[in-house]
Amino acid sequence: MWSVVNTTEDNARELSAYYEGVFMAKGKSMSVCVATNVYTDSDPFMSALEVLILGGSAYNSTDFRKHGLGLVARNMFGYDGEIVKYPDDPFDRFWEPYLDKNSVTESVRNLSVSGFWNLPPSKLFDTGLTTDQAKPMVLQWPPFSLPNSFYYISLYFADNRDSSLKTSRAFSVVVNGIEYYSRLNVTTPGVSVFATRWPLTGFTNITLIPSAGSDVGPVINGGEIFDVLLLGGTTLTRDVIAIEKVKKSLQNTPLDWNGDPCQPNKYSWTGVTCSEGPRIRVVALNLSSMGLSGSLSSAVANLTALTDIWLGNNNLSGVIPDLSSLRMLKTLHLENNQFSGEIPVSLGTISSLQELYIQNNNLTGEVPKILREKPGLKLQFSPGNHFSFPSSPSAI
């Protein structure tokens, strides 16, 4: 998953910019990739990164196996103070003030939020927007145009009057002319309504229409809106484990060798080529002339979708591992390194192998006959090694 970040406007106003997402952690660590986009005229940067664990009920109507949430706006309506965050919000979410032409109302009592799935701060219900009479209220929110997408929307309401009053506050919620919730009965304990995937584009109008028999005007206390982000595929776990082991055996690997080796799409690790589609595999390694040292881990043989390996012109040492499990391997370039030991005979069993370049190493022993006689194989094994060759048979 990736999202566009543009700090230009905030920077011009000498303000910081923050971006928030909600994702499911699938392991003990998560990776974050920062890369250039069409707005970038300098190096990408990140000033701070915070990771917080949400309550189990928060935003749990989203299928986080397929989607993530990118915050668009989170506001306290009728409030004009400082941003509300921790300790008022135990998850340190930022609730920004929001005022418009509608009347402001203040609560006369404290509200418990334990019954709200998303666990907003109780301060959210201290103020709200309302109308003076039992007439519709129109709220343009968020205050900017939205790109065409699906959005998670959660709206919060509470009747701020004395609970002993016997009058009702009921209304329908309409978003851009489409009924969002019909005859919502707002009581003093409060209520929230939400949509997990609501299509929006451009400016958004929220209209609260009093129901027949409602004695007072509608009220709204706050809202959250997230872009519903479709998660991209992830690299096959076996390949991730294997390439992490390869990384540990190498020295001076590229700086971007962190996180998922193939994702986000178009931002795979330097020198790593991946397949596309739902089953993402590592299909090629091209690390020639990268200044690498260390050794080549035997775990490379677990990258069974590999078709090409280029590791020439480095300073790699140790033995060449058994690669016979790489049944799709076409090209193996290990030239101009410090590999030692013998050439694995098993390389000759790879029927797809078309190029094998191993010259200028410290290899010993014999060049296996199965390689020397393999049809169609481009084999370069000299100069620079220490091979022995079998003597020609004596004539009888």
Image (spheres, rainbow, N blue to C red):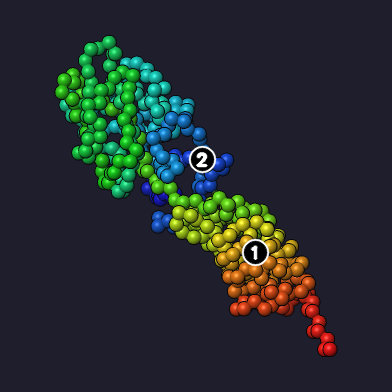
Q: Residues within 10 Å of mark 2 (few under 14, many from 20)?
A: few
Residue at 36% x, 43% y is: 227
Of the residues tagged 1 and 2, which is closer to the observer?
1
Q: The residue tagged with tag 1: helix, strand or loop?
A: loop
* Residue pointed to by mark 2: 25
Q: Residue 324, image x and y in percent?
A: 65, 64
Q: Are marks 1 and 2 in contact (CB under 8 Å)?
A: no
Residue type beneath disc 2: Ala
Q: Is residue 284 visible?
A: yes
Residue 118: % across, % down:
40, 30
Residue at position x 51%, y 45% in the image: 47
Q: Foreground residue, 125 or 27?
A: 27
Position of residue 342 in the picture relative to residue 177 (left or right): right
Residue 251 to residue 155: above or below: below
Q: Residue at x 32, y 16 (%)?
A: 108
Q: Residue furthest top?
A: 164
The circle on residue 324 is 1
Of labels 1 and 2, earlier in sequence is 2
